[in-house]
Amino acid sequence: DIRIYVEDDAGQRTELIGPTDMGLNLMELLKASGYDIMATCGGMALCATCHVEVLAGPALPEPGDDELDMLETLPVVHIGSRLSCQIRLTPRTDGLVVRLAPTGA
Ligand code: FES
């Protein structure tokens, strides 16, 4: 299993433990951990309600075209903006630090 850290607005980090052998993505782990993410599209890179800001950790695979197109529709994006449904949990995502972006922002 890997560790993912979710940083809140006060800079406090919460550790989540995620399995890497179930084909889960980060959005699914966040939802299962009780975070309020609508994920209206169910992880298809079509709604952007799973927007997160990657703050630190390992380098991730580059976003695909679907993800980039969707990120472009957001009113506010950050350097580390990603759609969490497009981040697959693998041993290479161990130690990732993210902040949840407000819905639509
Ligand atoms: Fe809809 Fe990620 S859940 S874009």
Image: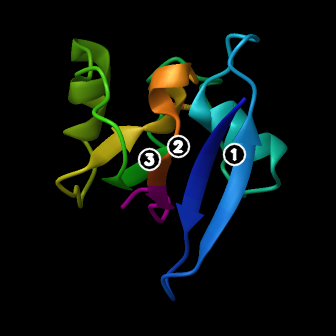
- Residues 24 and 36: in front is 24
Q: Say which label, 3 or 1, has the lower sequence index.
A: 1
Residue name at image x 19 percent, y 39 percent: 72
Say which of marks 2 and 1 sits in front. Answer: 1
Above or below residue 65? Residue 18 is below
Measured as percent of width and height from the top left, residue 11 is found at: 48, 82
Quadrant of the image for the N terminus? top right
- Left or right for 23, reference 76: right
Asked if residue 25 is among those painted magenta in the image, a careful observer would answer no
Image x and y of residue 19, in percent: 75, 25
Q: Which residue is mark 2?
A: 50
- Residues packed near mark 1 inside 10 Å, few (<14), some (14 to 19) or many (20 plus): many
Could you tell me residue 91's position as x and y percent?
Answer: 54, 22
Residue contact at pointers 3 and 2, CB within 8 angstroms: yes
Can residue 39 be seen?
no
Which of label 3 and label 1 is nearer to you? 1
Give the magenta-colored segment's residue range.
98-105
* Mark identifier at residue 51: 3
| Picture disc at residue 61 | none
Tag 3's secondary structure?
A: strand
